[in-house]
Image (cartoon, helix red, strand yellow):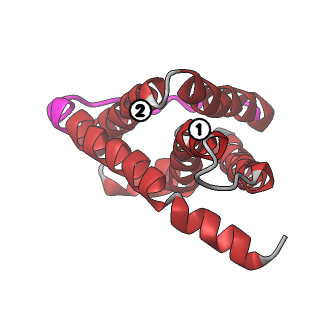
Amino acid sequence: MTNTTLISFVKDRRNSFAIAALIYLVFMIIGMFFAKHTGYFINYKQISWLSIFSHNMVLAFALVFTGWITFGISNSIATAINGAFFGNVLMGIWNRYGFCALQKVIFPHAVIEILATILFSALGYEVYYFVSALRGEKTYHIRNVLIFAMIGTILMLIASIIEGLESI
């Protein structure tokens, strides 16, 4: 497989990535709005990175597989809920502790985790490309899907290790 195949895969899927990112961002802002007068306590309990990783990967694969089954509806809803929850937590911690707490406790792992979540959500729209391939409109490269799933898994692993270190 050449790099042009992978590059064309990314170009073909840019709308999927944009839709997933937009859903996450819009609902994150909505979540922030609803939490504008709340304050959350940071609970420094020790959670293993493996437990965090397992939880995140269940969500990731649910985004992909339920997205395939529902033609993108369920992964869009789950991405919206995830974004709203993150926005709510973000604003709640901001209100109680300020920016420094976000910078030390949330941002180091959240940025990577959000990127992975958006990537997995975008892969949930893959059913449309598969149907196009079945109709003979395009060729379908499952290898590229697996490469992006692996990238998402590595991002989730990195985010989980960072989050596990933060909870010590």
Q: Amino acid at mark 1?
A: Val
Residue 39 is inside the magenta segment: yes
Question: Which residue is identified by label 1?
Answer: 131
Which residue is painted at 70% across and 78% down in the image? 4
Q: Residues within 10 Å of mark 1 (few under 14, many from 20)?
A: few
Quadrant location, the C terminus = top right
Q: What x and y, as percent, mark residue 105?
A: 51, 48
- The quarter of the picture where residue 167 lies is top right
Q: Is residue 139 visible?
A: yes
Q: What x and y, as percent, mark residue 90?
A: 34, 42
Question: Which residue is identified by label 2?
Answer: 76
Of the residues under marks 1 and 2, which one precedes in the sequence? Answer: 2
Which residue is painted at 49% across and 28% down in the image? 71
48, above or below 8, in the image: above
Highlighted range, magenta: 33-48
126, above or below 62, in the image: below
Q: Amino acid at mark 2?
A: Ser
